Amino acid sequence: MAFLEVRNACYSYSKGTPFEIKALDNCSFSVEKGEYIGVIGHTGSGKSTLMQLLNALVTPDSGSVLLDGKDINADKKTARDTRFRVGLVFQYPEYQLFEETVSKDIAFGPTNMGLSAEDVHKQVLWAAQIVGLPDALLDKSPFDLSGGEKRRAAIAGVMAMKPEVLILDEPAAGLDPIGRKVIMEMIDKYRTSTGATVLLVSHSMETVAAAADRILVLNKGAIAMDGDVQSVFSRADELITMGLDVPAVTRIAVKLKNMGYPVDAGVYSVEEAAKMLTAVLRAKEGTR
Amino acid sequence: MIRDITIGQYFPGTSLIHKLDPRVKIVLTVLNIAALFLCRNFFSLLLMFVMSVVWVLLSRIPFKTILKGLKMILMILIFTAFLQIFYNDGGTVLWHPVENWDFKITTEGVFSAIFIAVRIVSLILLSTLLTYTTSPTLLTDAIERLLSPLKVFKVKVHSLAMMMTIALRFIPTLIEEIDIIMSAQKARGADLETGSLIQRAKALVPILVPLFVNSFRRAYELAFAMEARCYGGDEKRTRLRVMKVSARDIVMLAVTLVCLTAVVVTSFANVGGFILFERVI
């Protein structure tokens, strides 16, 4: 039995009006505990809807979502409990801060879980430490923080619930390279200390390639590809026709392969590409 | 869901009503509404009701959409009609449960309830039709033109129209934003549906605070962006869409005026003894 499973899920927005949009079309996949999955897809491919499906914010029109083998939309209570187990960080989460102080805002989730004040406090401090927010900031108003700090505070607000599945929708959007790196490190830290499953939605192929073990590709509301990083990126041509990109090194590898060199087109990290190219060059020299 | 609110929405189309000059459309809507309030008997009200239905049919907006819009005011409609029954005690007594008690239902009470209900429905039909068939840009543009004579009195007509355009433009954005904020807070376990009235009011804080903060931020950004481009639409502006009054506008105007005259004549001149009851206004 899979840990988290989506079975034949379909979903449409504005049903029954001329504006009806089919967001998800018969999606099925399953996720195991501790996996790190990158989710990529063109704008409007249904990524965000799919992520909301996983924590019962969106109820499928047909099909089902199972967590530990139980339907998460069985009743209202199950749906609400699921949200504590499957944490979802929306895009630009800093726009949802509302409390007087940062620590109160982070405490919103754990408090809603019904934890004791002591436990709430513990989880808040723990989450703040994971995202690297210094204690001095915790008593400040969230609106006085810098952009990057706000983002971290907002992500801490979800991590403080210690969800078993953490979903992040473009967590690094609009940040500078250092800010992006910090966010990725935060996610790793959360993973190692909780063993949680992570789903990372991103437009940056490099980010996904570097972080995830497995990639889900969405196209027009359907799952177009599902596999490990190498096997997905080796299908560069298909990805490009879907309006997606591949990491820059992969593009070069694909070109080299088309030119007849014996290279692996699925290579996605610079280090590996360098190794592979030296091998190719060495072999060439040897034949001469 | 909050997305399904249709009042004030625009449904693009190419019907006769869509193609009317927006200035004429506004004037016609105002005239029709005025006529609706001048109705004093069933004949004139029926005329106006038929007129409203004809407008709806001409606009080719699906009837389902119109009904959905009406559903929103159903409670108000029932409540008003219900009160009207007891406000009017003329005519034949239909039901008088307790002797010596002033509580009774009479024919005139029932008539006036029906009268008010039909009038409200027609009113909603006519006024929603204006926004259903006119894009917000055209609507504000037309209002600006119609109000332009006020410039003589130093009224900043253009700025007012611009404010309206911006306000209308941001309604869908705000609705989308509320949707996202609600989902995000729900993802952290916010409970918006259960609890006492006070608990539910408190549950709105996590939604309203970010909504206001974001709205102010967006307003600043927009103002800066407009200023950075030296916005000054007030003077010497030329327009992409030049409004022209065409033959169809004149025909519609004529038809409306004839209806209006008919309403006034039948209501006030007591043609053929049509006045059923004069007290209902």
Image: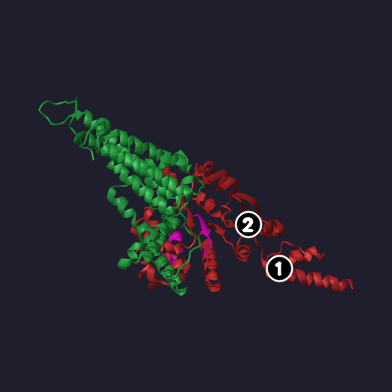
Chain colours: A red, B green
Residue at x 38% of width, y 41% of height: B70
Determine the residue located farthest toward the right in the rendered image: A288
The reply, left or right, for residue A117 in relation to residue B252 is left
Q: Residue at x 44, y 42 (%)?
A: B65
Drawn side of residue B31 relative to residue A198, left or right: left
Say which amino acid is labelled 1.
Answer: Glu
Q: Which residue is mark 2?
A: A214
Question: Tag 1: Cα neighbours inside 10 Å, few (<14), some, or many (≥20)?
Answer: few
Amino acid of disc 2? Arg
Please name whichever residue, A149 or A156, is drawn nearer the observer in this view of the structure.
Answer: A149
Which region shows up in magenta?
A: A152-171
- Of the residues under marks 2 and 1, which one precedes in the sequence? 2
Q: Which mark is residue B240?
A: none
Measuring from the top left, give residue A160's x and y in whole percent.
Answer: 43, 60
Say the numbered circle drawn on residue A272. 1
Of A145 and A82, the residue lying toward us: A145
Q: Chain of mark 2?
A: A
